[in-house]
Image (tube, rainbow, N blue to C red):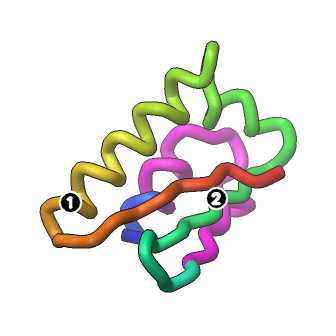
Amino acid sequence: MKELLLYIARNLVEHPEQVTVESYEGDPLVLELRVAPEDMGKVIGREGRIAREIRAIMKSVAQRQGIRVSVEIVD
């Protein structure tokens, strides 16, 4: 799950080397996404559309694996 989120985020931003994902086990599995401040808009998108789609993709993959996931975009 962590690798998928890293892959998606790194392909959206200008500074892929600054993308990090922290995972916290539990129910749901929490994934914290951090990007460079100037890339925050590219990950969130207009009216949060890109962030919403990233969360939808992650939830879909997690559901197939039988787990729950929560994606948080952190400053």
Mark 1, mark 2: which one is toward the viewer?
1
Residue occupying the far front of the picture: 27
Going 41% across and 63% down the picture, which residue do you hit? 69
Q: Which mark is residue 48?
A: none
The correct choice, above or below, for 16 with respect to 29 in the image is: above
Q: The residue under label 1 is which amino acid type?
A: Gln
Residue occupying the far bottom of the picture: 25
Residue occupying the far top of the picture: 46
The correct choice, above or below, for 9 with respect to 44 in the image is: below
Identify the mark nearer the N-term, 1 or 2: 2
Q: Where is residue 2, by image quadrant?
A: bottom left
Q: Which residue is mark 2?
A: 33
Q: Quadrant of the N terminus?
A: bottom left
* Image coordinates for residue 9, horizontal then vertical, percent: 53, 49
Q: Which residue is mark 1?
A: 63
Residue 17 drawn in magenta: yes
Secondary element type, mark 1: helix
Q: Which residues are magenta?
A: 6-23
Q: The residue under label 2 is which amino acid type?
A: Leu
**Number of numbered callouts drawn:** 2
Going 43% across and 44% down the picture, which residue do you hit? 55
- In terms of depth relative to the viewer, which is nearer, 16 or 30? 30
Secondary element type, mark 2: strand
Q: How far apart in space, not on screen, are marks 1 and 2 (Cα)?
A: 20 Å
Going 48% across and 32% down the picture, which residue do you hit? 52
- Do the CB atoms of the residues marked 1 and 2 lie less than 8 Å apart? no
Mark 2 neighbour class, 10 Å CA radius: few under 14, some 14 to 19, many 20 or more? many
- In the rendered view, does 75 fall on the left or right side of 50? right
- In the rendered view, does 18 fall on the left or right side of 3? right
The correct choice, above or below, for 47 with respect to 4 in the image is: above
* Image coordinates for residue 16, horizontal then vertical, percent: 64, 54
* Image coordinates for residue 35, horizontal then vertical, percent: 73, 52
